[in-house]
Image (cartoon, rainbow, N blue to C red):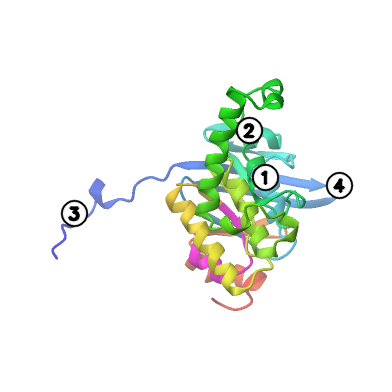
Amino acid sequence: MNMAVAPTGTAASKPAAQEVLLDVKNVSLSFGGVQAIKDVSFNINKGEIRAIIGPNGAGKTSMLNVINGFYHPQVGEITFKGETRSAMRPYVAASQGIARTFQNVALFRGMSTLDNIMSGRTLKMHKNFFWQMLRFGPALDEEIEHRHKVEEIIDFLEIQHIRRTPVGRLPYGLQKRVELARALAMEPELLLLDEPMAGMNLEEKEDMSRFILDVNDQFGTTIALIEHDMGVVMDLSTRVVVLDHGEKIADGTPEEVSANQDVIDAYLGVAH
């Protein structure tokens, strides 16, 4: 098959410019005398899977907490969808399209899978408390609409068989999947995943990796993830930023980062 090749130097030969969804600029965060993040800058392009890696205590979770408003940095700013801010409340971040999962599963253990995922639709519900209490007319119509969306997510993540099961009875790998489902119920533009593979066996990791790729591909969701499994990072991520003791030591493609001597010395130990 013959393929036309654009001449060198033409517009067709240049990669399309990437749209920056989130830009972190010179962020520093400290707790008392402990510096968790030191003058870190990086960006996340729309539609990519951006990995954040580094040894324990590197500041990775602190960075996610800054992005979605749990922590407020003393220095620096974040620009999300063109809006620059120095700090934001978590509910504001959620309302603007940032959702996250947690390193330790944070679900309502006594509630069913279905009800846990429905809780992710809260910000999408607009009928007032009076209508919600009556569960009649407009409020009932709204609930049916949201339940339909939740059922689509349940089908997508292949958890139909546990939809009525209290999540406290589920194995850890399925709890992680339910937490992902709840985050997806918010219909985020930016999804923050804090160690989504932690504690999983090989089969569970393969399933979660597949779902993350499908979320990125089919929903067009931009993803930032913290992950220690370098095989997962190499397979999933578009670009990788590496933190060590709160400082950025590398930023690039998975191949570039895995060959970086500073990263090998600080985190990998051997070349990957």
Residue 85 visible, this angle = no
Q: Is residue 226 left or right of residue 148?
A: right
| Residue extent of the magenta highlight | 224-237
Structural distance between the alpha carbons of marks 4 and 2: 34 Å
Judged from the image, the secondary structure of the residue bearing numbered disc 1 is helix
Query: In the picture shown, does residue 6 fall above or below 185?
Result: below
Residue under label 2: 123
Q: Give the image location of residue 66, x and y in percent.
A: 69, 44
Image disc number at residue 32 = 4
Residue 227 in magenta stretch: yes
Q: Residue at horizontal 69%, vertical 50%?
A: 112
Image disc number at residue 7 = 3
Going by the numbered disc 4, the residue's amino acid type is Gly
Structural distance between the alpha carbons of marks 3 and 1: 56 Å
First of labels 3, 2 by sequence position = 3
Q: Nearer the viewer, mark 3 or mark 2?
A: 2
